[in-house]
Image (cartoon, rainbow, N blue to C red):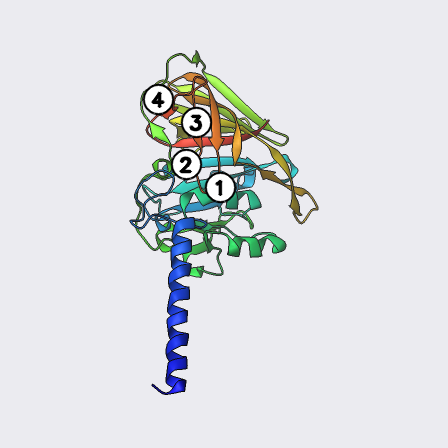
Amino acid sequence: MPAKTKKRSATATLAMLTAALTLAVSGCQGGEGSQTPDGRSPSTGESAPGSHILAVKIDNVAPARPQTGLETADIVYVEQVEAGLSRILAVYSSQLPPVVGPVRSARESDLELLRQFDRPTLAFSGAQTKLLPLIEAAPVDALPPEKAPDAYFRSRDRAAPHNLYLRPERALRDPPGVNAAKYAGFGFGPPPPGGRPVTEYSVRYPAAHFGFTWSAARQQWLVAMDGTPSRTPAGQQLGAATVVVQYVAVRPSRFHDRGGNTSPYTETVGSGTALVLRNGKAHEAEWERGTAESGTAFTTPDGRSMAFVSGQIWIVYAPR
């Protein structure tokens, strides 16, 4: 064999060995947002690729209400943002509404929270300039309006920036799949023993207030924001089957809004206490999330898994 041919053959063999070794190592380590070969969640075993899951950052100030499409979300996350206000991250998978919004900007906390869903689609209106590279590098399918102009539209009924809406069927590559709460590891079933009867519960941020009132007729916790019932555009009050008040660390991040207010960072990896509202009772609970890739485990004080009611879950992150 000529010397040049031998050299090319040796080079090709080395390249193939290097590629095989790289694949083997990455397969053992998993990596950020990785799935099992059959597309199941690595933390729960639920079957659904992350592309089935849509997370939308939704405005939550008075000019943005009533919001559209919240009632069909699998999970509604509530977090504190600048100036003591609040914003919503709604997660969809089992069904998609025709329209969701108003859509607003993402926060750094969203990236950690969403890693449990294995590269979901994140719909948002934009972000602080220095945060954009982190969003692009995160294991999410980032979908601001400039990437999918046909999926967004501006309503003439409201003033900007509270008038940007999303058409979810134009945002996802795949049709809806498994319930996003099941994919994240939440279990559904009968309540644990005990619990104290509760008809009302509230969570306050410095400049926002959430109230939940038990409705025996609807078997839901009716939602109010800033003292006013939260309604769909058709006029029905929003209601959650289960409400989780999760006590977390909220610290300043390195980012600021245009007014110079520091953006809070909500830490969703770690452990702490929670209060689970279901079936007209409040149950003390503990939560633990070991890594960003894993879901959050909720347990009773004696260590048993906390089961939720089948239906929409609201998770309100409350500062410790």
Of pointers 3 and 4, the one earlier in the residue sequence: 4
Of pointers 4 and 1, the one earlier in the residue sequence: 4
Q: Residue furthest right?
A: 260
Counting from the top left corner in percent of width and height, residue 124 is at: 50, 50
Where disc 3 sits, the SS reads strand
Q: Which mark is residue 219?
A: 4
Of pointers 3 and 1, the one earlier in the residue sequence: 1
Where disc 1 sits, the SS reads loop
Q: Which mark is residue 292?
A: 1
Residue nearest the observer in this picture, 47 or 168: 47
Q: Which mark is residue 115?
A: none
Residue at (38% x, 81% y) in the render = 6
The residue pinned by badge 2 equals: 75
Amino acid type assigned to the residue bearing label 3 in the image: Phe
Q: What separation in Å lies between label 4 and label 1 (alpha carbons)?
A: 33 Å
Q: Nearer the viewer, mark 1 or mark 2?
A: 1
Q: Nearer the viewer, mark 2 or mark 3?
A: 3
Of pointers 1 and 2, the one earlier in the residue sequence: 2
Quadrant in the rendering for residue 280 = top left
Residue neighbourhood size for the residue with mark 1, other residues' Cα within 10 Å, grouped as few (<14), some (14–19), many (≥20): some
The residue pinned by badge 3 equals: 298
